[in-house]
Image: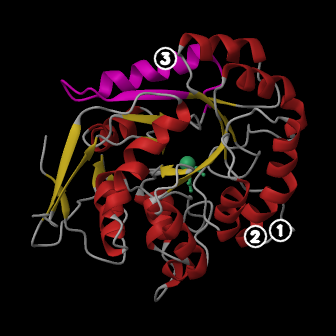
């Protein structure tokens, strides 16, 4: 008989993650390495990871902070700038120092000031990625004060993504942390083999009202910003469909309380401790646990051309809601994402 309170699936990977460095890295990395086999590590440190030697040093720093016996593997990315050296990128990708390259439109989000001001500067870089079959990861928002913050993803599709894909037909692209119906529908309608998207637990759980529930809620603020309920519902449908174009990427982005609860609070939601429990709760509610393994563990490696983790993990439903304590860093802390529903799915295997 089917036990509806237990689920077993291949160890998942996180295809979009921020772990920072120094004391924040030390405080947060265990929350990812416990639950995930691999993670695509975002390169937007205050001094961004722009060369393969920086990527290698950053990878070593992460490995040094892992708990004993951890088998977690960080997959590094190159932060693209207007002056990225295509040869350094090629060598980095070939040697495994990098798994992918990340495009931040300059000024789009946290630590993106060194990002790309005009993607036409990067045609040589896109040629290298196409030649090696390595993905370009895009923060898909235009940076334009004249474009409403809620429309920036849709305008990005029209103004940047469509022309880019027309110019570089073989370029593999991951449209990161999508938040709109337009993004889902663009991918579904095109049905391409070289375009996929990650979806976060928070964009599946909240709509934009969550930022204004009884007051301003800085811990619900991230970029791309949460949209209307109809968008959340479309993201949910895409994630729960099993469609190979959509896979797990938490965009877990730790910022201390001091920097979030401020007159100009940082964008980013920290969800690593509760990410799998949140996704499972959402899939259960959508009666889609049968598609969970595709979304969390299979579609990502298929797109990246990497093996699926063979290890199996089991989650069980507890009777009482789970509690995820905030992460303490010296005198400050990082608040863990709290979805507007209780979480019950707890890992049963080590
Ligand atoms: C991320 C961060 O804090 O680095 N913030 C966020 O709101 N998601 C950057 C990003 O992925 O946009
Ligand atoms: Zn991110």
The answer to which of marks 2 and 3 sits earlier in the sequence is 3
Q: What whole-number distance in Å separates the C-alpha atoms at marks 1 and 2?
A: 7 Å
- Single out the mark in the foreground, 1 or 2: 2
Q: Which residue is mark 3?
A: 57
Crowd rating for badge 1 (residues with CA inside 10 Å; few <14, some 14–19, many 20+):
few
Highlighted range, magenta? 47-76
Residue 22 % position (x, y)? 40, 32
Image quarter in which the N terminus is found: bottom left
Q: What whole-number distance in Å separates the C-alpha atoms at marks 2 and 3?
A: 37 Å
Most foreground residue, 148 or 178: 178
Most foreground residue, 217 or 315: 315
Q: What whole-number distance in Å separates the C-alpha atoms at marks 3 and 1?
A: 38 Å
- Single out the mark in the foreground, 2 or 3: 2
Q: Quadrant of residue 178?
A: bottom right
Does the residue at mark 3 contact the one at mark 1 (Cβ under 8 Å)?
no
SS for dot 1: loop
Q: Is residue 41 visible?
A: no
Residue 67 % position (x, y)? 22, 29
């Amino acid at each position: 008989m089917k036990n509806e309170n237990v689920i077993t699936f291949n160890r998942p990977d996180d295809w979009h993650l921020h772990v920072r460095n120094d004391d924040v890295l030390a405080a947060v990395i265990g929350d990812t390495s416990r639950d995930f086999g691999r993670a695509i590590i975002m390169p937007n440190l205050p001094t961004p990871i722009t060369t393969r030697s920086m990527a290698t040093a950053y990878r070593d720093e992460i490995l040094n902070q892992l708990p004993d016996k951890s088998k977690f593997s960080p997959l590094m990315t190159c932060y693209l700038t207007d002056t990225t050296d295509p040869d350094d990128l090629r060598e980095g990708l070939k040697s495994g120092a990098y798994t992918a390259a990340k495009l931040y439109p300059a000024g789009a989000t946290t630590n993106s000031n060194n990002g790309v001001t005009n993607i036409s500067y990067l045609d040589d870089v896109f040629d290298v990625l196409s030649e090696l079959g390595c993905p370009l990861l895009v923060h898909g928002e235009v940076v334009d004060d004249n474009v409403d913050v809620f429309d920036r993803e849709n305008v990005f599709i029209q103004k940047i993504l469509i022309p880019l894909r027309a110019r570089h037909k073989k370029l593999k692209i991951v449209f990161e942390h999508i938040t709109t119906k337009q993004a889902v529908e663009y991918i579904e309608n095109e049905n391409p083999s070289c375009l996929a998207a990650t979806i976060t637990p928070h964009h599946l759980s909240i709509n934009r009202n969550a930022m204004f529930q009884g007051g301003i809620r800085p811990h619900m603020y991230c970029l791309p910003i949460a949209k209307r309920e109809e968008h959340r519902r479309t993201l949910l449908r895409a994630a729960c469909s099993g469609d190979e174009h959509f896979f797990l990427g938490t965009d877990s982005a730790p910022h201390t309380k001091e920097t979030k609860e401020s007159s100009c609070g940082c964008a980013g939601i920290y969800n690593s401790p509760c990410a799998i429990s949140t996704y499972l709760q959402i899939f259960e509610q959508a009666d889609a646990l049968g598609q969970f393994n595709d979304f969390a563990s299979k579609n990502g490696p298929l797109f990246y051309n990497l093996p699926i983790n063979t290890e199996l993990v089991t989650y069980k439903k507890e009777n009482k809601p789970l509690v995820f304590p905030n992460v303490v860093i010296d005198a400050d802390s990082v608040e863990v994402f709290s979805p507007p529903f209780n979480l019950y799915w707890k890992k049963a295997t080590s």
